[in-house]
Image (cartoon, grey):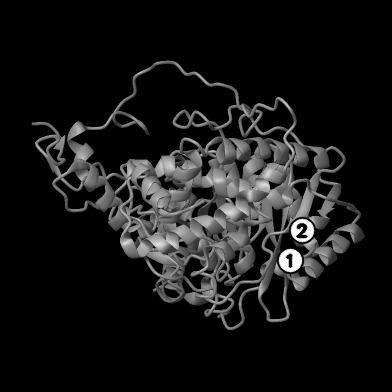
Amino acid sequence: MSNRSSLPPMDATVGEAQQWLADGHCTSRQLIDGYLEFLQGVGRELNAVVEIFVESAQQAADQSDQRRAQGQCFGPLDGIPFTVKMNITTQLGSSDASSPMLRGFQAKEDATAVRRLRAAGAVLVGKTSCDEFAMGASNETSCHGVVSNPWDRERVPGGSSGGSAALAGSHGWSFHLGSDTGGSIRQPAAFCNATAIKPTWGQVSRRGLIAFGSSLDQICPIARDAVDCQSVLQVMEGHDPLDSTSLRQGTSSHPPIGRVALISDGLGPGIDASIATAVRSAAQQMASQGIEIIERSLPHLEAANACYQVISTAEASSNLARYDGVHVGVRGQSKDLQQLYETSRHQGFGSEVRRRILLGTFVLSAGYQDAYYNRALAVRDLIRQGIDQVLEDCDALLLPVSPFAPFPIGERIDDPLALYACDILTVTANLAGVPALALPCALDEEQLPIGMQLMGPHGSDHALLEFGQRWQRWNDQHRALPEGSTR
Amino acid sequence: MIDEALVRKTAHLARLEVSDDEIPGLVEHLEKILDLVDILRSVEIPEGHRSDLHVSQATVSMTREDQSSNPTDAGGPRDPAAFGENAPDWRDGSFVTPRVVG
């Protein structure tokens, strides 16, 4: 058992924990043991963590300590604990995308992002729950059960990366890998008071990310602050021969963000007044630090969610066609091949996944493709052009992450459309392929976290993260942990 | 526009079994979501617009050298015997399915 007094404060960021290790206040082994204790306690209570890798994590920590003793520390993530969402493959444990379809699925290799992080010395400590195949905004469709929000355990942590966010929102020292197809890292980050970035599409290899909507999906870091997200992104990003869609060119250089467009459509009807007020006051705080704030409208914002529903489900119906009861996963009983597919997919997929496959198949089917899928592709182009237009006279767009606060568990799960409404402000970044950074902004009157997001042009990921670091020097909301969680 | 027959036909295309009691809920859901996406019709698309742009304008068509890799490389060739490790039914180096011929 580690000596608690030697561990960093519970809200310490990865950067601070790394400094703590460098200063010799504790070993990586002690840090990892302390974090494993948190996972086994609070992590399990929140139902955020599905698998915990005690022995391999301890071994990796010991190796990190040896490197450090020899003066060969690998850098800012060496000896630091991290978790991986269940829809990202790891050799350790299982990678079931929180679906009965893949229960017990053993991946043969780490996702490229995971492999690069482990090679940088980061210590994989567990796998986190998520919505089934990352389809959801409340983490209530996971086959591993509902995850609680650390700020109010009767409420959802958001989704689909709900497990990752619940951990990031309740303890420091660590970072977490999630994914974002329509807001799946940003919305839970906002709900749990964590910092997360959805990188430019192609910035991070998707090798090993169990596909949902391939033209939208990205692996994303979520952590306590923008410094940590940047350290993780720097290790994960860059071309990967195993993902031909990962970008080849290096990070383009973008000037520091000096002019920000507050998106007025994101503050109007349908958005909680407390959230609109918090984001407006964040803009004022930026202005008081010399950032020029302009107000703009984002064309087609109201059509973006419809566009997303069509494109993401179409891609999902195609990507999930591979689960056929033959190659992997659940198999239904049947003497006929056609029926084998149908019964296996009935047994293996939850109702939300089946609804989305059905819609996606419909919008691609003969007679409907032009009216829905092709139309959505055209609108997607206009959405992207709309963002480009606004970015012509500013460096980034500012808007809330979620239109409402974290909601009680069970409140929306029986009304899919009420859940889809969670995505209205986040899907635009995925449709346009641009990066979007979610930052804690304030607490509402019920002491629930409010998040805001900044979207920038393609390749401006690091400019956004550097701006996030400046913001977090002006405003320390990101340091807050839920009441009662501090040791 | 959405009725039971259309849901059954689409489910068949998706290779999804649907039970009789699921049908009314699915009809209702599809109707609602198609109402929601109806807004796409109100967006004016410029004449002659072609959606052939990729999501990332920076992405160009990629090619790579046709090189072999080693089993120990990430993404390298696998031992065929391991293909079936996650399969529900794998015998003698083959995925087992119900009989499809003869």
Badge 1 local density, few (<14 within 10 Å), some, or many (20+)?
some
Residue at 65%, 35% in the rendered image: A378
- In the rendered picture of this protein, how many numbered marks are placed on residues? 2
Residue A364 falls left or right of residue A328: right
Outermost top residue? B66
The image position of residue A341, as x and y in percent, is 26, 46
Q: Viewed as shown, does residue A154 lie left or right of A97?
A: right
Relative to A322, say whether A421 is above or below. below
Comparing A395 with A55, the one in front is A395
Residue at image point 37% right, 34% down: B74
Q: Amino acid at mark 2?
A: Gly
Q: Residue at x 63, y 43 (%)?
A: A431
Rendered image quadrant of residue A184: bottom right
Q: Label 1, on which residue?
A: A271
Same chain for labels 1 and 2? Say yes or no. Answer: yes
Chain under disc 1: A
Q: Is residue A353 above or below residue A486?
A: above
Which of the two discs, 1 and 2, labels the residue nearer the N terminus?
2
Determine whether A414 is above or below A196 in the image. below
- Report x, y in % for residue A421: 62, 61
Question: Label 2: chain?
Answer: A
Q: In this orientation, which residue lies closer to the viewer: A296 or B48?
A: B48
Q: Amino acid at mark 1?
A: Ile
Instruction: Give the x, y percent position of residue A109.
Output: 35, 42
Dividing the picture into quarters, in which one does residue A149 lie?
Answer: bottom right
Q: Are marks 1 and 2 in contact (CB under 8 Å)?
A: yes
What is the secondary structure assignment of the residue under circle 2?
helix
Residue ID for mark 2? A266
Residue A22 shows in the view? no
- Residue A406, image x and y in percent? 61, 72
A29 and A189: which one is in front? A189
Q: Residue at x 49, y 70 (%)?
A: A414
